[in-house]
Image (spheres, helix red, strand yellow):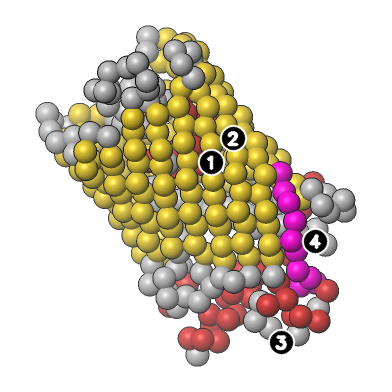
Amino acid sequence: MKSILQSYIFLVLAGLQIILGSNRSFAQQKAMFSQYMFNGLVINPAYSSVDDALNITALARKQWVGFEGAPNTQTFSVHSPIKESNTSAGFIFMRDQIGEVITENGASGTLAHRVEVGDNTYFALGLSGGLSKYVGMYSQSGSASAAQDPVFADQNSMRMNLGFGMMFFSKQFYAGFSSPYFYYRDLENASSTSASYKPHYILQGGYLTDLSDDIKFKPNVLIKYVNGSPMQIDLNANFLFKETIWIGASLRSMDSLDLLAEMQVTPNIQLGYSYDFTTSRLAAVEKGSHEIVLNFRLSNRGKSSTLPKCYF
């Protein structure tokens, strides 16, 4: 029974790739991360303006452990200010896979600029653009008739993506609005239309306050909207103890309860882990989701090796 349910859910996931778009759709939902507050560049290209240090971040997410064909995602991002200017640049490399059927590997660049709008308060605007290789082996989706059904025709194409983001921030708070995949098109399929992909709009925010000399509290919120789909809300609360360990939890609507922990291994290295307890019906056939984040934060050439702390 479990095997049948797994196959059914997987076929639904594959079918959504087709139903939500045009006659050769690529309307899949983009990956969502539990530790978005520690991996900001992948959801908002303006994020690189927040920190004046060189940041290198690697993330690996294994979703729905125990469920055959479950998504897994890896990202690698780098961002840094450009010399002493208020402009920053970044690069993102991403691999997204659903079972053996759907894979997408891509790279994009980001560019952001900030202006001071108040006392140590800034507004930043960022843009991103890149290419990815999409392979959809829909004929191997598990159905005996799929190989003969033109609806499940395989896809192998290059795609381009353009995104934007903006952030308003200081040392105590941040607020952002972005669409990292605002314009996402197949370069090899002339028949694709604007209905083939619906942009994801993301609203995010966070605030930092001191509870005592050794404890800081940082609540975060992320709201994702896709036209035609229910709005998804992620509410998060993190506590920082002795500038060393973050402990937190998130509640994601219609999806999961997440536990998070981040540790400052050295002044320049931060390691994080999260575990998602699924609250949807998928809990019957899977054992939660794992996510690991590793961040290197380094000074730029010519600057002191002691960096001011960045909490966002």
Residue 82 drawn above or below residue 119: below
Mark 2 vs mark 3, CA separation in Å: 41 Å
**Which residue has dot 4 on it?**
24
Q: Residue at x 33, y 25 (%)?
A: 299
Residues rendered magenta in the picture: 151-160
Q: Residue at x 62, y 56 (%)?
A: 104
Q: Nearer the viewer, mark 4 or mark 2?
A: 2
Q: Earlier in the sequence, mark 4 or mark 2?
A: 4
Q: Earlier in the sequence, mark 2 or mark 3?
A: 2
**Which residue has dot 3 on it?**
144
Disc 1 vs disc 2: Cβ atoms closer than 8 Å? yes
Q: Nearer the viewer, residue 236 or 244?
A: 244
**Which residue has dot 2 on it?**
109
Q: Quadrant of residue 291?
A: bottom left
Residue 296 drawn above or below residue 114: below
Q: Is residue 205 part of the magenta span, yes or no?
A: no
Disc 2 vs disc 3: Cβ atoms closer than 8 Å? no
Q: Earlier in the sequence, mark 1 or mark 4?
A: 4
**Which residue has dot 1 on it?**
92
Q: Quadrant of residue 7?
A: bottom right
Mark 1 vs mark 2, CA separation in Å: 6 Å
Q: Nearer the viewer, residue 138 or 241?
A: 138
SS for callout 4: loop
